[in-house]
Amino acid sequence: MAVRATKLLLAVFVVFLLGAAPAGASALAQPPTTTTAPAGPVIDAPSEADTAKTRNNLIIGAVAVVLLGIVIYGNRKRAKKK
């Protein structure tokens, strides 16, 4: 049963890699489509909500680092007591 399941999974993987496109020469003869890139990056000013969310993420990250430091310091103190 395990061999059948392995063969089935391998077959599904191969079909996924090859895709459902026809294997005829007409599929290979299509010219590639080209797109033009925009002139430059579009930079939007951050909104008030984005600024507040970023500030909250930084505060949460700082608190996590401080708590990790406390845990590491406590583990070292406890290890030295033993």
Image (tube, helix red, strand yellow):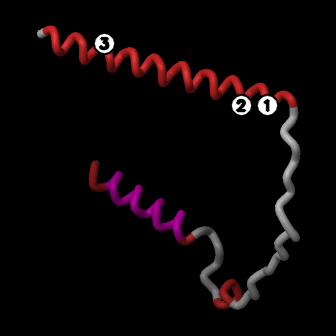
**Is residue 11 or residue 76 the one in the foreground?**
76
Q: Is residue 38 left or right of residue 69?
A: right
Q: Is residue 60 left or right of residue 4?
A: right
Residue at point 24%, 12% (across, down):
77
Disc 2 residue crowd, few under 14, some 14–19, many 20+, Cα 10 Å: few
Q: Find disc 2 in the rendering and name its residue.
A: 54
Q: Secondary structure at mark 3?
A: helix
Residue 5 x, y percent position in the rendering: 35, 52
**Residue 51: assigned label:** 1
Q: Earlier in the sequence, mark 1 or mark 3?
A: 1
Magenta run includes residue 66: no
Q: Which residues are magenta?
A: 4-17
**Residue 74: assigned label:** 3
Q: Residue furthest left?
A: 82
Which quarter of the figure has residue 22?
A: bottom right
For the residues carrying marks 2 and 3, which lies nearer the camera in this image? 3
Residue 81 x, y percent position in the rendering: 15, 8
Q: Are marks 2 and 1 in contact (CB under 8 Å)?
A: yes
Which quarter of the figure has residue 74?
A: top left
